[in-house]
Image (spheres, rainbow, N blue to C red):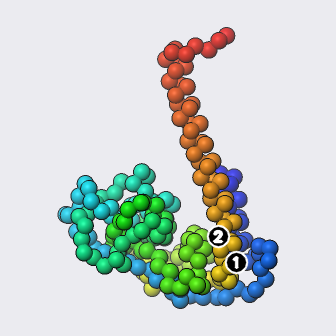
Amino acid sequence: EQKKELKKGLMQKLLTGEVRLPGFKGEWKEIKLGEFVKLQGGYAFKSSKFKQIGIPIIRISNIAPEITEHEQEFVYYEETTISENFHIKSGDILIAMSGATTGKVGIYKGKKIAYLNQRVGKFVNKDSSKLDYNFLYYLVLSPMFKVQLTEELATGAQPNISSRQIENFKFKIPSLEEQKSITSTLNKIDKTISLLKKEVYLLKQQKKGLMQLLLTGKVRVKV
């Protein structure tokens, strides 16, 4: 939790230019997200054709920080000839576009292609020479993104956001080189947090096993 708070504070400072990494001095440029990014909407798959096996479909309920078959319950669809615009590959950034979790962002970590369901958006980088896709991930997790999202959602009766609305969000971004440097810094913290999560999980499993042994008398405590 301490590392998460550290990351949160560092993100705020690095993604606004309040703190600059060594070697970077240039002015940041204000852009509309849509200049470099397309937010691809999903396909209206028929729920009556959902299956137990096949190509996984990513629905709003699947949006989580890391989207994998180990963490979420998927429904599946038979392989079909739809546009590749509706294909999801490992590393794609996704966002919930309606419902109670509108604005929630996650990365697809599955090893095989999945399908993009309606009301789920996929961020597509239109110009990788100007915008680093990993920098975009931290940008859409930032308070600046959430503030603009909240302002848009406040005008509607139901939580709902369109691709055009998100593409109109404004941000200041640095050069590509500085974007990559910021991404590298934040990524190191993410890796540390991931390792700490695994350590906590293993300790909990160890405690669970030890409780089982102690509370059944299989292992006795020496007095």
Q: Number of numbered discs present?
A: 2
**x and y, in percent, of residue 61 in the image:** 39, 61
On screen, residue 151 above or below 117? below
Find residue 90 and report its horizontal and vertical position in percent.
Answer: 45, 65
Q: Residue at x 35, y 65 (%)?
A: 114
Quadrant for residue 113, please give it. bottom left
Q: Quadrant of residue 119?
A: bottom left
* Whether label 1 touches label 2, CB < 8 Å: no
Viewer-nearest residue: 53 or 164: 53
Residue at image point 42% right, 51% down:
70
Quadrant where the image shows the C terminus: top right
Would you say 197 lies left or right of 113 here? right
From the viewer's perspective, tell me whether residue 158 is left or right of residue 54.
Answer: right
Q: Position of residue 24 (x, y in %)?
A: 77, 79
Residue 168 in view in this figure: no
Residue beneath the point at 62% across and 59% down: 190
Q: Which one is nearer the viewer's eye here, 199 or 221?
A: 199
Q: Farthest residue in the top direction?
A: 223
Q: Amino acid at mark 1?
A: Glu
Reading the image, the residue beneath label 1 is 178
Write the residue at 23% across / 64% down. Answer: 78
Q: Residues within 10 Å of mark 1 (few under 14, many from 20)?
A: many
**Residue under label 2:** 183
Residue 219, relative to residue 128: is it above or below? above
For the residue marked with disc 2, what is the amino acid?
Thr
| Residue 2 x, y percent position in the rendering | 69, 52
Left-right relation of 53 to 176: left
- Local secondary structure at mark 2: helix
Compare marks 1 and 2 and give the one earlier in the sequence. Answer: 1
Taking the image as drawn, is residue 57 in sight? yes
